[in-house]
């Protein structure tokens, strides 16, 4: 089950929800369709379990970044971790959640909304972390934390799209470095 779920994750990561067929899943997992249905339910249920796996196994860098004592280090660690995952194994994979959310038919709209909600949870975590940085004096009091959280999230989405399009790790790192070079100065600076 564990290996099949990992294999399914990589198919969904590559092709997104809509682009993945049950034939793709059976080929990748080595489990015939009735076995997949029995183990995981329908395609949507398997996709949700695969995305859960992705978040549990591959996006731990978010929590690690948010736990950094200094906000610039938090942002740096976030982008470093994200870039590593988005280029895992030297392949421009992008983000499994983003890949799944970008192209959905009307029938898959509920899944797309779930993925958007997952992204929003991360953005909300950034807003909370940025608010703490303002209280600590690491950012100016006038910082719009919701906007800055949206900015960090949007840059990360852009990195994911660029990675998926084949951008090199070096160019992705240069973009992240530019964000840090233009980061708001501490309140006392």
Image: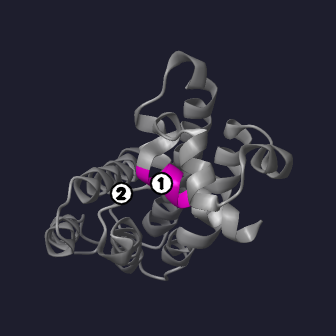
Question: Which of disc 2 and disc 1 is earlier in sequence?
Answer: 1
Q: Is residue 118 left or right of residue 141?
A: right
Q: Position of residue 68 (x, y in %)?
A: 49, 81
Position of 32 compared to 98: left or right? right
Q: Is residue 173 visible?
A: yes
Q: Would you call the spot at circle 1 few (<14 residues within 10 Å), some (14-19), or many (20 or more)?
A: many
Using the rendered image of the protein, determine whether residue 121 is visible from the camera's viewpoint: no
Question: Residue 164 appears in which quarter of the rendering?
Answer: bottom left
The range drawn in magenta is: 9-14
Under circle 1, the secondary element is: helix
Residue matched to label 1: 13
Quarter that holds the C terminus: bottom left
Marks 2 and 1: in contact by CB < 8 Å?
Answer: yes
Looking at the rendered image, the quarter that the N terminus falls into is: bottom right
The secondary structure type at the circle numbered 2 is loop
Image point 33% across, 69% down: which residue? 87
Q: Is residue 103 part of the magenta span, yes or no?
A: no
In three-dimensional space, the C-alpha distance between marks 1 and 2, rounded to whole angstroms, equals: 8 Å
Residue 143: percent from the left, percent from the top? Answer: 35, 53
Q: Which residue is mark 2?
A: 94
């Amino acid at each position: 089950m564990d290996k099949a779920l990992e294999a399914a994750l990589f198919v969904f990561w590559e092709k997104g929800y809509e682009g993945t067929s049950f034939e793709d899943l059976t080929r990748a997992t080595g489990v015939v369709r009735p076995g997949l249905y029995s183990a995981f339910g329908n395609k949507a249920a398997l996709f949700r379990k695969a995305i859960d796996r992705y978040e549990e196994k591959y996006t731990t860098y978010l929590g690690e970044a948010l736990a950094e004592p200094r906000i610039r280090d938090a942002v740096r660690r976030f982008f470093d971790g994200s870039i590593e995952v988005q280029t895992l194994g030297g392949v421009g994979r992008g983000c499994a959640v983003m890949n799944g959310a970008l192209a959905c038919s009307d029938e898959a709209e509920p899944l797309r909304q779930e993925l958007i909600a997952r992204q929003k949870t991360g953005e909300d975590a950034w807003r909370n972390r940025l608010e703490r940085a303002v209280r600590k004096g690491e950012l100016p009091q006038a910082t719009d934390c919701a906007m800055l959280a949206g900015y960090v999230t949007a840059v990360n989405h852009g990195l994911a799209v660029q990675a998926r399009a084949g951008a090199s790790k070096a160019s992705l790192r240069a973009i992240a470095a530019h964000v840090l070079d233009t980061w708001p100065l501490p309140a006392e600076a």
